[in-house]
Image (spheres, rainbow, N blue to C red):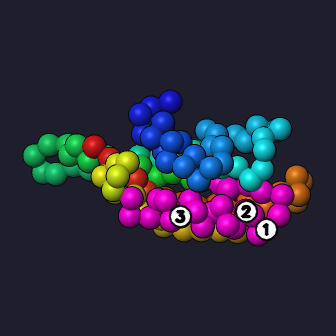
Amino acid sequence: MTMIEATLKSALETTGKSAYALVKPEKATLPCITYRRIGTYHHRNLSSPSSLNRIRFQIDVWGSDYSSTRTLANSVVTKLEANQTDWEVSTVENELDMRDEESGLYRVLIEVYLWNK
């Protein structure tokens, strides 16, 4: 786990719920959070690479009912939107509500960009 992932995990866990990298453990207490790095954009200028990177993360909030899942997702969005405490700045770009038919769990997918040096 890199420094930015460790910082993101800590920030997500300030919601009072567990956060896991990549995959939700089968016996995880619900609701819970998973996160994964989707991509990293390395900014450059004409003379050299910039020290600022834009990192895209997918955050999934999982729950057994829609209400608790959406409530936790709202807490995650509040924590991450325009956060300048844990990194340069973060922006929430998209949210998508869904239900996993196989597991029967509710899920809110949140796309976020973290700007970091």
Which amino acid type is shown beneath numbered disc 1?
A: Tyr
Name the residue carrying label 3. Answer: 77
Label 3 crowd (10 A; few <14 / some 14-19 / many >=20): many
87 or 101, which lies in front? Answer: 87
* Front residue of this view, candidates 42 and 82: 82
Majority SS type along the magenta span: helix
Q: What's the residue type where badge 3 is placed?
A: Val
Residue at 12% across / 51% down in the picture? 46
Q: Which residue is mark 1?
A: 66
Q: Secondary structure at mark 1?
A: helix
Magenta extent: 60-83
Where does the image place residue 81, in percent across and percent down from the top left?
44, 64
- Do labels 1 and 2 touch, CB within 8 Å? yes
Q: Earlier in the sequence, mark 2 or mark 3?
A: 2
**Quarter occupied by the C terminus:** top left
Residue picked out by circle 2? 69
Q: Are marks 2 and 3 in contact (CB under 8 Å)?
A: no
Who comes first in sequence, dot 1 or dot 3? 1
Q: With respect to residue 85, does 51 lie above or below? A: above
Q: Element at badge 3?
A: helix
Residue 18 visible? The answer is yes
Query: Where is residue 68 shown, x and y percent of the image?
Result: 75, 64
Within 10 Å of disc 2 (Cα), the crowding (few <14, some 14-19, many 20+) is many
Q: Is residue 65 magenta?
A: yes
Residue 34 shows in the view: no
- Is 13 a magenta residue? no
